[in-house]
Image (cartoon, rainbow, N blue to C red):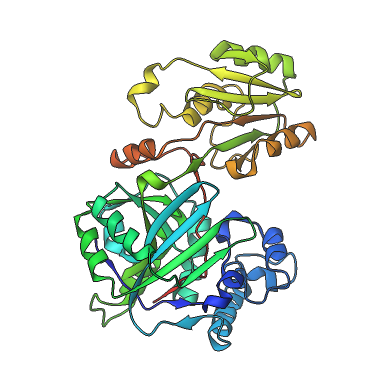
Protein backbone atom coordinates (compact mmCIF):
# COMPACT_ATOMS: atom_id res chain seq x y z
CA UNK A 1 0.00 0.00 0.00
CA UNK A 2 1.09 3.53 -0.73
CA UNK A 3 0.38 5.73 2.25
CA UNK A 4 1.91 8.96 3.46
CA UNK A 5 2.00 11.44 6.31
CA UNK A 6 0.27 14.78 5.86
CA UNK A 7 0.21 18.28 7.31
CA UNK A 8 -3.22 18.18 8.92
CA UNK A 9 -5.63 20.88 9.89
CA UNK A 10 -6.86 20.03 13.39
CA UNK A 11 -8.46 21.60 16.45
CA UNK A 12 -6.46 22.45 19.54
CA UNK A 13 -6.60 19.84 22.29
CA UNK A 14 -9.06 21.84 24.38
CA UNK A 15 -11.42 22.32 21.43
CA UNK A 16 -11.29 18.80 19.99
CA UNK A 17 -14.48 17.59 21.67
CA UNK A 18 -16.44 20.63 20.51
CA UNK A 19 -15.17 20.42 16.92
CA UNK A 20 -15.50 16.64 16.44
CA UNK A 21 -18.74 15.67 14.69
CA UNK A 22 -20.50 12.51 13.59
CA UNK A 23 -20.10 11.60 9.90
CA UNK A 24 -22.25 13.75 7.63
CA UNK A 25 -24.22 10.77 6.32
CA UNK A 26 -25.31 9.37 9.68
CA UNK A 27 -27.68 12.26 10.41
CA UNK A 28 -30.27 14.20 8.44
CA UNK A 29 -30.47 17.98 8.35
CA UNK A 30 -32.85 18.23 11.31
CA UNK A 31 -30.67 15.97 13.46
CA UNK A 32 -27.54 17.92 12.45
CA UNK A 33 -29.20 21.18 13.49
CA UNK A 34 -29.93 19.77 16.94
CA UNK A 35 -26.42 18.38 17.40
CA UNK A 36 -24.75 21.66 16.40
CA UNK A 37 -27.15 23.97 18.23
CA UNK A 38 -25.26 26.37 20.46
CA UNK A 39 -21.87 25.02 19.33
CA UNK A 40 -20.17 27.30 16.85
CA UNK A 41 -17.17 24.93 16.83
CA UNK A 42 -19.08 21.89 15.53
CA UNK A 43 -17.65 20.53 12.29
CA UNK A 44 -21.23 19.95 11.16
CA UNK A 45 -21.18 23.61 10.09
CA UNK A 46 -18.76 22.42 7.38
CA UNK A 47 -19.95 18.89 6.64
CA UNK A 48 -23.68 19.76 6.79
CA UNK A 49 -23.60 23.52 6.06
CA UNK A 50 -27.32 23.71 5.27
CA UNK A 51 -27.85 23.91 9.04
CA UNK A 52 -26.73 27.55 8.80
CA UNK A 53 -29.26 28.36 6.08
CA UNK A 54 -33.06 28.68 6.22
CA UNK A 55 -35.05 25.50 6.65
CA UNK A 56 -36.16 23.87 3.42
CA UNK A 57 -33.05 24.84 1.45
CA UNK A 58 -32.07 22.37 -1.27
CA UNK A 59 -29.05 20.60 0.23
CA UNK A 60 -27.51 20.33 -3.24
CA UNK A 61 -27.89 24.03 -4.08
CA UNK A 62 -24.99 26.38 -4.85
CA UNK A 63 -25.54 28.33 -1.64
CA UNK A 64 -25.01 25.22 0.49
CA UNK A 65 -21.57 24.52 -1.00
CA UNK A 66 -20.70 28.22 -0.78
CA UNK A 67 -21.63 28.17 2.91
CA UNK A 68 -19.39 25.11 3.44
CA UNK A 69 -16.43 26.98 1.93
CA UNK A 70 -17.24 30.12 3.92
CA UNK A 71 -17.43 28.18 7.19
CA UNK A 72 -14.25 26.22 6.44
CA UNK A 73 -12.35 29.48 5.87
CA UNK A 74 -13.82 30.97 9.05
CA UNK A 75 -12.80 27.94 11.14
CA UNK A 76 -9.20 28.47 10.06
CA UNK A 77 -9.29 32.25 10.43
CA UNK A 78 -10.77 32.06 13.94
CA UNK A 79 -8.41 29.33 15.10
CA UNK A 80 -10.93 26.51 15.41
CA UNK A 81 -8.70 24.54 13.00
CA UNK A 82 -4.92 24.89 13.21
CA UNK A 83 -2.24 23.79 10.72
CA UNK A 84 0.36 21.26 11.86
CA UNK A 85 3.97 22.40 11.56
CA UNK A 86 5.06 19.22 9.76
CA UNK A 87 3.81 16.03 8.11
CA UNK A 88 2.51 13.50 10.62
CA UNK A 89 0.66 10.22 10.88
CA UNK A 90 -1.69 9.54 13.77
CA UNK A 91 -3.01 6.66 15.83
CA UNK A 92 -6.75 6.94 16.51
CA UNK A 93 -8.22 4.76 19.27
CA UNK A 94 -11.94 4.44 19.97
CA UNK A 95 -13.55 2.80 23.00
CA UNK A 96 -17.24 1.88 22.97
CA UNK A 97 -18.01 0.00 26.15
CA UNK A 98 -15.74 -3.04 26.18
CA UNK A 99 -14.94 -2.71 22.48
CA UNK A 100 -11.64 -1.05 21.49
CA UNK A 101 -10.30 -0.41 17.99
CA UNK A 102 -7.07 1.30 16.93
CA UNK A 103 -6.49 2.78 13.50
CA UNK A 104 -3.64 4.58 11.76
CA UNK A 105 -4.59 7.90 10.15
CA UNK A 106 -2.74 8.52 6.88
CA UNK A 107 -3.36 9.55 3.30
CA UNK A 108 -3.91 6.77 0.76
CA UNK A 109 -3.25 7.10 -2.97
CA UNK A 110 -6.11 7.50 -5.43
CA UNK A 111 -4.41 5.12 -7.86
CA UNK A 112 -4.51 2.33 -5.28
CA UNK A 113 -8.29 2.81 -5.30
CA UNK A 114 -8.40 2.88 -9.10
CA UNK A 115 -6.24 -0.27 -9.30
CA UNK A 116 -8.40 -2.12 -6.75
CA UNK A 117 -5.69 -2.31 -4.10
CA UNK A 118 -8.29 -0.50 -2.00
CA UNK A 119 -11.17 -2.92 -2.47
CA UNK A 120 -14.85 -2.05 -2.34
CA UNK A 121 -17.92 -4.12 -1.54
CA UNK A 122 -20.72 -1.62 -2.22
CA UNK A 123 -21.97 0.40 -5.15
CA UNK A 124 -22.40 4.12 -4.72
CA UNK A 125 -25.39 6.30 -5.49
CA UNK A 126 -24.79 8.97 -8.12
CA UNK A 127 -26.44 11.80 -6.18
CA UNK A 128 -24.43 11.13 -2.99
CA UNK A 129 -21.18 10.74 -4.90
CA UNK A 130 -21.82 13.96 -6.84
CA UNK A 131 -22.52 15.79 -3.60
CA UNK A 132 -19.32 14.75 -1.83
CA UNK A 133 -17.19 15.25 -4.97
CA UNK A 134 -18.38 18.83 -5.18
CA UNK A 135 -17.86 19.25 -1.43
CA UNK A 136 -14.23 18.09 -1.72
CA UNK A 137 -13.52 20.37 -4.67
CA UNK A 138 -15.16 23.42 -3.08
CA UNK A 139 -13.24 23.00 0.17
CA UNK A 140 -10.10 21.63 -1.52
CA UNK A 141 -10.05 19.22 1.40
CA UNK A 142 -11.11 15.76 2.56
CA UNK A 143 -13.31 16.75 5.47
CA UNK A 144 -14.16 13.21 6.59
CA UNK A 145 -11.89 10.13 6.70
CA UNK A 146 -12.57 6.88 4.86
CA UNK A 147 -12.68 3.84 7.15
CA UNK A 148 -10.36 1.15 5.72
CA UNK A 149 -9.45 -2.26 7.12
CA UNK A 150 -6.67 -4.75 6.45
CA UNK A 151 -5.78 -8.27 7.52
CA UNK A 152 -3.93 -8.10 10.83
CA UNK A 153 -0.20 -7.56 10.96
CA UNK A 154 1.58 -8.22 14.28
CA UNK A 155 4.40 -5.80 13.48
CA UNK A 156 2.01 -2.90 12.99
CA UNK A 157 0.16 -3.89 16.16
CA UNK A 158 3.39 -3.67 18.16
CA UNK A 159 4.20 -0.22 16.75
CA UNK A 160 0.73 1.06 17.59
CA UNK A 161 0.95 -0.36 21.13
CA UNK A 162 4.19 1.56 21.74
CA UNK A 163 2.66 4.80 20.44
CA UNK A 164 -0.30 4.35 22.83
CA UNK A 165 2.09 4.62 25.78
CA UNK A 166 2.89 8.22 24.87
CA UNK A 167 0.91 11.32 25.80
CA UNK A 168 -2.08 11.77 23.46
CA UNK A 169 -2.88 14.78 21.33
CA UNK A 170 -6.65 14.40 21.93
CA UNK A 171 -8.50 12.39 24.57
CA UNK A 172 -12.21 12.94 25.22
CA UNK A 173 -15.52 11.20 25.72
CA UNK A 174 -18.25 12.21 23.26
CA UNK A 175 -21.86 12.72 24.31
CA UNK A 176 -22.70 9.19 23.16
CA UNK A 177 -20.17 7.73 25.61
CA UNK A 178 -17.54 6.77 23.02
CA UNK A 179 -13.98 7.71 24.02
CA UNK A 180 -11.77 9.11 21.25
CA UNK A 181 -8.00 9.28 21.72
CA UNK A 182 -5.48 10.44 19.11
CA UNK A 183 -1.66 10.29 19.16
CA UNK A 184 0.56 12.24 16.77
CA UNK A 185 3.68 10.71 15.20
CA UNK A 186 5.88 13.20 13.35
CA UNK A 187 7.01 11.81 10.01
CA UNK A 188 5.76 8.32 10.81
CA UNK A 189 8.33 6.69 8.55
CA UNK A 190 8.36 3.37 10.43
CA UNK A 191 4.61 2.93 10.22
CA UNK A 192 4.59 3.98 6.58
CA UNK A 193 7.28 1.41 5.82
CA UNK A 194 5.38 -1.33 7.67
CA UNK A 195 2.27 -0.81 5.54
CA UNK A 196 4.25 -1.48 2.35
CA UNK A 197 3.94 -5.17 3.24
CA UNK A 198 0.12 -4.96 3.33
CA UNK A 199 -1.07 -6.17 -0.09
CA UNK A 200 -4.46 -4.45 -0.04
CA UNK A 201 -7.02 -2.71 2.14
CA UNK A 202 -10.82 -2.77 2.14
CA UNK A 203 -13.33 0.04 2.40
CA UNK A 204 -15.27 -0.84 5.52
CA UNK A 205 -17.28 2.39 5.79
CA UNK A 206 -17.31 5.48 3.62
CA UNK A 207 -17.74 4.20 0.06
CA UNK A 208 -19.17 7.54 -1.07
CA UNK A 209 -16.40 9.52 0.62
CA UNK A 210 -13.79 7.31 -1.05
CA UNK A 211 -15.36 7.48 -4.51
CA UNK A 212 -15.79 11.25 -4.22
CA UNK A 213 -12.23 11.85 -3.03
CA UNK A 214 -10.82 9.80 -5.89
CA UNK A 215 -13.08 11.40 -8.47
CA UNK A 216 -12.19 14.88 -7.24
CA UNK A 217 -8.51 14.01 -7.44
CA UNK A 218 -8.84 12.68 -10.97
CA UNK A 219 -10.74 15.79 -12.08
CA UNK A 220 -8.22 18.13 -10.47
CA UNK A 221 -5.37 16.19 -12.08
CA UNK A 222 -7.02 16.47 -15.51
CA UNK A 223 -7.46 20.23 -15.16
CA UNK A 224 -3.86 20.85 -14.08
CA UNK A 225 -1.64 21.30 -17.12
CA UNK A 226 1.39 21.32 -14.83
CA UNK A 227 0.50 18.04 -13.09
CA UNK A 228 3.61 16.30 -11.72
CA UNK A 229 2.14 13.52 -9.56
CA UNK A 230 3.18 14.77 -6.13
CA UNK A 231 0.17 17.05 -5.59
CA UNK A 232 -2.01 16.53 -2.53
CA UNK A 233 -5.08 15.82 -4.66
CA UNK A 234 -3.46 12.48 -5.53
CA UNK A 235 -4.09 11.40 -1.92
CA UNK A 236 -7.13 11.16 0.33
CA UNK A 237 -7.76 10.89 4.06
CA UNK A 238 -8.07 7.36 5.48
CA UNK A 239 -7.95 5.48 8.79
CA UNK A 240 -6.61 1.91 8.59
CA UNK A 241 -7.85 -0.61 11.17
CA UNK A 242 -6.85 -4.28 11.61
CA UNK A 243 -9.81 -6.49 10.69
CA UNK A 244 -9.92 -8.39 13.98
CA UNK A 245 -10.72 -5.19 15.90
CA UNK A 246 -13.78 -4.17 13.90
CA UNK A 247 -17.32 -4.39 15.20
CA UNK A 248 -20.19 -4.79 12.73
CA UNK A 249 -23.75 -4.27 13.90
CA UNK A 250 -26.80 -5.49 11.96
CA UNK A 251 -28.49 -3.33 9.37
CA UNK A 252 -32.19 -3.95 9.91
CA UNK A 253 -35.11 -3.55 7.52
CA UNK A 254 -38.60 -2.05 7.78
CA UNK A 255 -41.24 -2.37 5.04
CA UNK A 256 -44.04 0.16 4.66
CA UNK A 257 -46.84 -2.23 3.64
CA UNK A 258 -47.63 -5.88 2.91
CA UNK A 259 -48.61 -5.24 -0.69
CA UNK A 260 -52.33 -5.47 0.01
CA UNK A 261 -52.18 -8.53 2.28
CA UNK A 262 -53.44 -8.91 5.81
CA UNK A 263 -50.98 -10.00 8.51
CA UNK A 264 -52.45 -13.53 8.34
CA UNK A 265 -52.16 -13.73 4.56
CA UNK A 266 -48.58 -12.48 4.71
CA UNK A 267 -47.63 -15.03 7.37
CA UNK A 268 -48.96 -17.79 5.14
CA UNK A 269 -46.58 -16.62 2.39
CA UNK A 270 -43.66 -16.42 4.83
CA UNK A 271 -44.21 -20.03 5.94
CA UNK A 272 -43.87 -21.19 2.34
CA UNK A 273 -40.22 -20.07 2.21
CA UNK A 274 -38.98 -20.11 5.82
CA UNK A 275 -39.30 -22.20 8.95
CA UNK A 276 -41.19 -20.01 11.41
CA UNK A 277 -41.05 -20.10 15.21
CA UNK A 278 -43.29 -18.08 17.50
CA UNK A 279 -42.12 -15.91 20.41
CA UNK A 280 -38.61 -15.53 19.00
CA UNK A 281 -35.99 -13.18 20.48
CA UNK A 282 -35.88 -9.71 18.97
CA UNK A 283 -32.33 -10.34 17.72
CA UNK A 284 -31.30 -13.55 15.94
CA UNK A 285 -28.67 -15.56 17.79
CA UNK A 286 -26.85 -17.01 14.78
CA UNK A 287 -26.55 -16.73 10.99
CA UNK A 288 -29.31 -18.06 8.71
CA UNK A 289 -31.87 -16.62 11.11
CA UNK A 290 -33.96 -13.44 10.98
CA UNK A 291 -36.29 -12.08 13.66
CA UNK A 292 -39.48 -10.60 12.19
CA UNK A 293 -41.82 -8.23 14.04
CA UNK A 294 -45.42 -8.09 12.91
CA UNK A 295 -48.78 -7.74 14.68
CA UNK A 296 -47.17 -7.00 18.03
CA UNK A 297 -45.01 -10.13 18.23
CA UNK A 298 -41.60 -11.42 17.22
CA UNK A 299 -41.27 -14.48 14.98
CA UNK A 300 -38.12 -16.34 14.05
CA UNK A 301 -37.36 -17.13 10.39
CA UNK A 302 -34.74 -19.75 9.58
CA UNK A 303 -33.57 -21.74 6.57
CA UNK A 304 -31.10 -24.37 5.48
CA UNK A 305 -28.13 -23.45 3.32
CA UNK A 306 -29.09 -24.24 -0.25
CA UNK A 307 -27.67 -23.27 -3.58
CA UNK A 308 -26.88 -19.84 -2.17
CA UNK A 309 -23.98 -21.29 -0.15
CA UNK A 310 -21.67 -21.42 -3.20
CA UNK A 311 -22.12 -17.70 -3.91
CA UNK A 312 -20.67 -15.41 -1.18
CA UNK A 313 -23.21 -12.67 -1.96
CA UNK A 314 -26.32 -14.85 -2.25
CA UNK A 315 -25.32 -16.66 0.96
CA UNK A 316 -25.63 -13.46 3.01
CA UNK A 317 -28.66 -13.34 5.30
CA UNK A 318 -29.70 -10.00 3.81
CA UNK A 319 -29.59 -11.57 0.32
CA UNK A 320 -31.67 -14.59 1.34
CA UNK A 321 -34.30 -12.33 2.89
CA UNK A 322 -34.33 -10.13 -0.21
CA UNK A 323 -34.38 -12.97 -2.76
CA UNK A 324 -36.90 -15.22 -1.01
CA UNK A 325 -39.29 -12.75 0.59
CA UNK A 326 -38.82 -9.03 0.05
CA UNK A 327 -38.71 -9.23 -3.76
CA UNK A 328 -41.09 -12.08 -4.71
CA UNK A 329 -43.65 -11.55 -1.95
CA UNK A 330 -43.48 -7.87 -1.03
CA UNK A 331 -42.41 -6.54 -4.43
CA UNK A 332 -39.23 -4.80 -3.23
CA UNK A 333 -37.40 -5.48 -6.48
CA UNK A 334 -34.63 -2.94 -5.96
CA UNK A 335 -33.96 -2.08 -2.29
CA UNK A 336 -31.53 0.62 -3.42
CA UNK A 337 -34.31 2.72 -4.95
CA UNK A 338 -37.60 1.43 -3.50
CA UNK A 339 -39.50 3.92 -1.34
CA UNK A 340 -41.33 1.10 0.46
CA UNK A 341 -38.31 -0.14 2.40
CA UNK A 342 -36.23 1.64 5.00
CA UNK A 343 -32.99 0.63 6.68
CA UNK A 344 -32.26 1.05 10.38
CA UNK A 345 -28.71 0.82 11.72
CA UNK A 346 -28.24 -1.62 14.56
CA UNK A 347 -27.01 1.14 16.86
CA UNK A 348 -30.65 2.26 17.16
CA UNK A 349 -31.68 -1.09 18.64
CA UNK A 350 -34.80 -3.18 18.07
CA UNK A 351 -36.99 -0.72 19.98
CA UNK A 352 -36.84 1.45 16.88
CA UNK A 353 -38.29 -1.46 14.87
CA UNK A 354 -41.15 -2.23 17.25
CA UNK A 355 -41.97 1.46 17.54
CA UNK A 356 -42.28 1.86 13.78
CA UNK A 357 -44.59 -1.13 13.40
CA UNK A 358 -46.68 -0.46 16.53
CA UNK A 359 -47.24 3.14 15.43
CA UNK A 360 -48.43 2.05 11.99
CA UNK A 361 -45.55 3.78 10.24
CA UNK A 362 -44.42 0.38 8.88
CA UNK A 363 -46.16 -2.96 8.47
CA UNK A 364 -43.31 -5.33 9.26
CA UNK A 365 -39.72 -5.16 10.49
CA UNK A 366 -36.79 -7.54 10.20
CA UNK A 367 -33.97 -7.77 12.74
CA UNK A 368 -30.84 -9.19 11.10
CA UNK A 369 -27.78 -11.10 12.29
CA UNK A 370 -24.63 -9.02 11.58
CA UNK A 371 -22.59 -9.66 8.47
CA UNK A 372 -19.01 -10.62 9.38
CA UNK A 373 -15.79 -8.87 8.38
CA UNK A 374 -14.65 -12.14 6.79
CA UNK A 375 -17.75 -12.21 4.57
CA UNK A 376 -17.17 -8.59 3.57
CA UNK A 377 -13.54 -9.20 2.61
CA UNK A 378 -14.33 -12.43 0.73
CA UNK A 379 -16.90 -10.62 -1.38
CA UNK A 380 -14.50 -7.74 -2.10
CA UNK A 381 -11.73 -10.22 -2.98
CA UNK A 382 -14.10 -11.86 -5.47
CA UNK A 383 -14.77 -8.49 -7.10
CA UNK A 384 -18.42 -8.66 -6.09
CA UNK A 385 -20.74 -6.20 -4.36
CA UNK A 386 -22.83 -6.71 -1.27
CA UNK A 387 -26.51 -5.76 -1.26
CA UNK A 388 -27.18 -2.20 -0.08
CA UNK A 389 -27.14 -1.64 3.66
CA UNK A 390 -25.45 -4.91 4.60
CA UNK A 391 -23.06 -3.61 7.26
CA UNK A 392 -23.20 -0.99 10.01
CA UNK A 393 -19.84 -0.31 11.62
CA UNK A 394 -19.58 1.10 15.12
CA UNK A 395 -18.10 3.18 16.53
CA UNK A 396 -18.10 5.78 13.78
CA UNK A 397 -15.07 7.94 13.04
CA UNK A 398 -15.44 11.58 14.02
CA UNK A 399 -15.04 14.25 11.36
CA UNK A 400 -13.06 17.42 12.01
CA UNK A 401 -10.33 15.96 14.20
CA UNK A 402 -7.92 15.68 11.29
CA UNK A 403 -8.49 17.30 7.89
CA UNK A 404 -6.42 16.73 4.75
CA UNK A 405 -6.19 19.75 2.44
CA UNK A 406 -5.53 19.49 -1.30
81 relative position to 262: left or right = left
Closest to the observer: 253 or 197?
A: 197
Question: Where residue 272 sits: x, y (%)?
Answer: 57, 11
Residue farthest right in this picture: 359
Residue farthest front in this picture: 165
Task: Residue at 61%, 67% (x, y): give it.
Answer: 48
Q: Is residue 114 at all visible to an observer of this figure? A: no
175 relative position to 124: left or right = right
Q: Quadrant of the N terminus?
A: bottom left
Q: Identify whether 375 is placed above or below 276.
A: below
Task: Residue at 45%, 67% (x, y): give it.
Answer: 182
Closest to the observer: 115 or 365?
A: 365
Q: Identify whether 371 is placed above or below 30.
A: above
Task: Residue at 71%, 30% (x, y): give it.
Answer: 257
Question: Where residue 37 sits: x, y (%)?
Answer: 72, 69
Closest to the observer: 204 or 233?
A: 204
Residue farthest bottom in this picture: 77
Q: Quadrant of the C terminus?
A: bottom left
Question: Where residue 153 sits: x, y (%)?
Answer: 26, 50
Closest to the observer: 313 or 297?
A: 297
335 relative position to 195: left or right = right
Corner quadrant of residue 362:
top right
Question: Where residue 42 sits: x, y (%)?
Answer: 62, 71
Task: Residue at 57%, 19% (x, y): give it.
Answer: 301
Amino acid sequence: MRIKAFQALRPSGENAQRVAAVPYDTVNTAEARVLAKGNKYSFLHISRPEIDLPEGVDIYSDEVYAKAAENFTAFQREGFLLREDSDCVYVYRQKMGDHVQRGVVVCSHIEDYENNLIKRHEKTRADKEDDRTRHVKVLKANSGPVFLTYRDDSGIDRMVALIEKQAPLFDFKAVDGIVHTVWRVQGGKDLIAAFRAIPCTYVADGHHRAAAAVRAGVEMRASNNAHKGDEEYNWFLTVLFPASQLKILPYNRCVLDLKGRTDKEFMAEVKKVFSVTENAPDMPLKPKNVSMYIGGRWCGLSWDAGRESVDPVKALDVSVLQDRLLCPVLGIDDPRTSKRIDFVGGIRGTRELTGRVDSGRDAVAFSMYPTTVEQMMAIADAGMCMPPKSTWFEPKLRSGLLVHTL
